[in-house]
Amino acid sequence: MEHCQDFLGTLLVHAGKLRPGGRLYYAIPNRLFTFDRDRPNTTIEHLVLDHEQGPSLSKRDHYLEWVHLVAKTPAHKAGAYAQSLMDAAYSIHFHAWDARALLHCLTAGIEYLRFPGSVVHFEMNGHEVICLIEKE
């Protein structure tokens, strides 16, 4: 999910494949234990904007954030490096969360999408958060 530019759109597509009682299983990195540790938590407001306006509007900002805070690229080289990654369609973590922020985004996203279901399991597993979402 961290690689998806439209997190809510992806959640909606996945959820649409479920029968009642079906479950989505996600293992999503906790940014505090990965190379994303210096990045801010992605907010539900950001996810809604990506979903409603299309992720292309924030795509360059995602790459610039990744170049600055993960790759630690000097400022004078950041723009060119970000552009080269975009041109190559290099797969980055477009979004990053700690466990609390992820749970908030999942539950708020389910509500926003009016998905008939809920998070039924949420636990830390090393550097990942395991999430189960069940369709009612």
Image (spheres, rainbow, N blue to C red):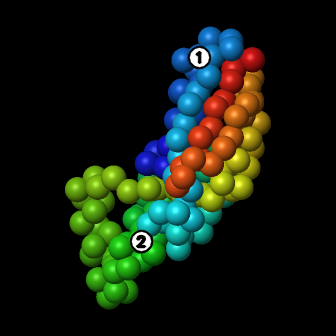
Among numbered discs 2 and 1, the one appearing first in the sequence: 1
Q: Is residue 9 visible?
A: no
What residue sits 57% from the left and 65% below the top? 32
Please provide percent x and percent y for residue 86. Answer: 30, 59
Against 21, residue 50 (above or below) is: below
On screen, residue 58 versus residue 124, left or right, reads left
Callout 2: helix, strand or loop?
loop
Pointer 2: what residue?
70
**Mark 2: amino acid:** Val
Task: Work out whether residue 31 or residue 90 is closer to the camera in this orientation and state it.
Answer: 31
Q: 10 Å neighbourhood of mark 1: few (<14), some, or many (≥20)?
A: some
Q: CA distance from mark 2 to mark 1?
A: 35 Å
Q: 10 Å neighbourhood of mark 2: few (<14), some, or many (≥20)?
A: some
What residue sits 62% from the left and 38% below the top? 131
* Image quarter (top left, top right, bottom left or bottom right) of the C terminus: top right
Please provide percent x and percent y for residue 9. Answer: 55, 36
Return the mark for residue 122.
Answer: none
Callout 1: helix, strand or loop?
loop
Pointer 1: what residue?
18
